[in-house]
Amino acid sequence: MVQKKSKAEREEETGKPIWILIDLIRPFKGQPRIYFNPDQMNSLTGSIEEFDQEDVVKVRRLRDKKDPRHKYELIDGERRYLACKKAGKKKIQAVVKKVKDLEEQFFKSLTANACRAGLTPFEEALAIERAMKMKRMRDLPAGQQVVMFSKIFGCTTVTIYKRLALLRLHPEVRAMLDPRLPAEKQLSLALADFISENDPGFQLAVAKKAVEKKMTLNQARSFARKLAHKKGVSAGTAKHRGPHDDYRLFSSFVRKTFDQLGMFAESALRENLLKRPLEDLEVMDTALKEIISRFTELKNALLTRRLLTRR
């Protein structure tokens, strides 16, 4: 016997905004936003008190027997949800969406948050790391994943790589990036990026000294280089490179090359290339063959090394 749908469920299926009791909605614990800027929240609350809610939130209907109190869960709009509660609103205007699983819910939340009041850099890093482990991303080459995230966040691929570099930071250094800290106790994002390639102990020593002495970025970089010199390693853009630095440089080159070549997979760009004079195409063909030859040599060297290691 087919269960008859309630009036509320029929209204939800229209895709139009409906009014829902706020107490029936729960936040989405897996959403990418962790930090809510107090000034922005106060401003939003004041706007809702004065002009009521202007933008709807998005929710999904729950079928959670362990949580009978809540009938819906947020997909997008926790800032508005919290502001409406603070403003004393009993109901909130929402659109009910269908999502097939938590991965889809997370991606919808991520894309929505990326387009509004910005996530903190570390929230972006954690969101990217989490998304990269999901089914829809696993089959994509790393370079394509980075390009996709650059489109989601509206930034360059270099910025995405910098966000991922933050995940290599010592836990205490990560904590110094928390925007809830007083300004004088916060570590600058630029310095965090500068030291992210170094070992955790080195990161912590530089970060603590920079915050303690209230160093400018240039002063902190200078201190990092001096400390690195004493330890016989490199920091940031130090001129003297070792084998590990060469590997990082090459790895970065490969990633960037892959990303930039990906642009020419688009039909419009490819067609523009083919419109060039024949002599230009012949020169390009020769250059590409040389590049492919050199990459093939390197690939064979790496493959030989791997085969020898396995013996």
Image (spheres, helix red, strand yellow):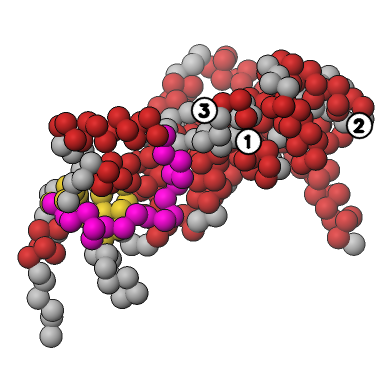
The image quadrant that residue 48 belongs to is: top left
Q: Position of residue 113 (x, y in %)?
A: 38, 40
| Amino acid on which disc 3 is placed | Thr
| Neighbours of disc 2 within 10 Å: few (<14), some (14-19), many (20+) | few
Note whether residue 27 is visible: yes
- Of pointers 3 and 2, the one earlier in the residue sequence: 3
Q: Which residues are magenta?
A: 19-37
Mark 2–mark 1 CB contact (< 8 Å): no
Q: Position of residue 54 (x, y in %)?
A: 18, 36
Residue 236 in magenta stretch:
no
Residue in the image at 56% along x and 30% along y? 182
| Amino acid on which disc 1 is placed | Met
For the residue pair 176 and 106, the one nearer the viewer reads as: 176
Between the residue at mark 1 and the residue at mark 3, the CA separation in whole angstroms equals 25 Å
Closer to the observer: label 3 or label 2? 2
Q: Position of residue 207 (x, y in %)?
A: 72, 31
Q: Position of residue 109 (x, y in %)?
A: 37, 47
Q: Which residue is mark 1?
A: 176
Badge 2 element: helix
Residue in the image at 31% along x and 75% along y? 65
Q: Which residue is mark 3?
A: 156
Residue in the image at 32% along x and 51% along y? 75
For the residue pair 283 and 38, the one nearer the viewer reads as: 38
Q: Which residue is mark 2?
A: 231
Badge 3 element: loop
- Of pointers 1 and 3, the one earlier in the residue sequence: 3
